[in-house]
């Protein structure tokens, strides 16, 4: 294959970020990876700008994710639990976000025995609620115009989780080389 494949109608070149990584039978994977790259960057940009619109600037994308995870279900969480759910290996980056959120009074910390638990403060819960309002206004309303019952989105989410496992397995294999 010349790097192009017949999709429907005219020959269309795959959209990839790094052509030199694509072998003749892996163009679709390279297209998927490019989609991940631009989706990750768009999602990160969205979370930061939505949080700023909610009145909280100077947040990194990780800060936003950590705040929402800590607020999730109103249950206190340990650092290790937050990292596990967000699938983050480097605990120090989450710890830094937690310290920042505690300093901003959006998250409170409580020591129970040897463990430290984090929970959203009242102000943190209000920040998450404001984020949700803006999300509804700017994102969810547009999502609803796609129609259907969300089946395609659920399938895409399942595919992303599947690929997460494949990339994890590949990263373990690469670590052993």
Image (cartoon, helix red, strand yellow):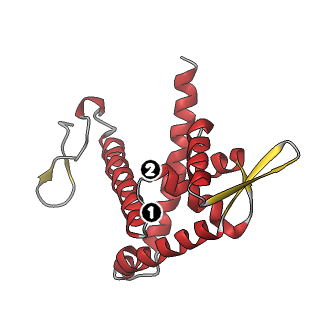
User: Which quadrant holds residue 128?
Assistant: bottom right
Q: Is residue 128 above or below residue 44?
A: below
Q: Dot 2: few (<14), some (14–19), or many (≥20) neighbours within 10 Å?
A: some
Residue at mark 2 to residue at mark 1: CA–CA distance: 11 Å
User: Which quadrant holds residue 74?
Assistant: bottom right
Which of the two discs, 2 and 1, sits closer to the camera?
1
Q: Is residue 93 left or right of residue 26?
A: right
- SS at badge 1: loop
Q: Which residue is mark 1?
A: 56
Residue nearer the viewer, 144 or 82: 82
Q: Is residue 39 left or right of residue 115?
A: left
Q: Residue shown at 38%/76% (left/top)?
A: 143
Residue nearer the viewer, 76 or 32: 76
Q: Residue shown at 58%/19% (left/top)?
A: 176
- SS at badge 2: loop
Q: Residue furthest left?
A: 10
Pinpoint residue 44: horizontal percent, then vertical percent: 39, 54
Q: Residue furthest right?
A: 113
Residue nearer the viewer, 11 or 112: 112
Q: Residue shown at 59%/61% (left/top)?
A: 106
Pinpoint residue 91: horizontal percent, then vertical percent: 62, 38
Q: Residue shown at 41%/82% (left/top)?
A: 148
Q: On residue 168, which mark appears?
A: none
Q: Is residue 50 left or right of residue 115?
A: left
Q: Is residue 18 above or below residue 177?
A: below
Residue nearer the viewer, 127 or 170: 127
Q: Dot 1: few (<14), some (14–19), or many (≥20) neighbours within 10 Å?
A: some
Q: Quadrant of the N terminus?
A: top left
User: Which quadrant holds residue 42?
Assistant: bottom left
Q: Which residue is mark 2?
A: 60
Q: Is residue 121 above or below residue 136?
A: above
Pinpoint residue 150: horizontal percent, then vertical percent: 46, 76
């Amino acid at each position: 294959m010349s790097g192009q494949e017949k999709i429907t109608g005219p020959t269309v070149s795959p959209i990839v970020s790094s052509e030199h990584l694509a072998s003749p039978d892996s163009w679709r994977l390279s297209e998927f990876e490019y989609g991940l790259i631009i989706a990750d960057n768009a999602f990160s940009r969205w979370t930061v700008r939505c949080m700023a619109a909610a009145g909280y600037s100077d947040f990194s994308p990780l800060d936003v994710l950590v705040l929402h995870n800590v607020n999730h279900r109103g249950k206190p969480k340990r650092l290790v639990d937050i990292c596990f759910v967000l699938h983050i290996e480097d605990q120090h980056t989450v710890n830094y976000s937690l310290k920042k959120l505690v300093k901003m009074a959006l998250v409170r910390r409580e020591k129970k025995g040897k463990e430290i638990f984090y929970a959203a403060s009242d102000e943190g819960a209000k920040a998450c609620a404001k984020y949700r309002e803006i999300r509804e206004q700017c994102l969810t309303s547009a999502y609803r115009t796609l129609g259907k019952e969300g089946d395609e989105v659920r399938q895409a989410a399942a595919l992303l989780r599947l690929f997460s496992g494949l990339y994890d397995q590949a990263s373990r294999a690469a670590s052993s080389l």
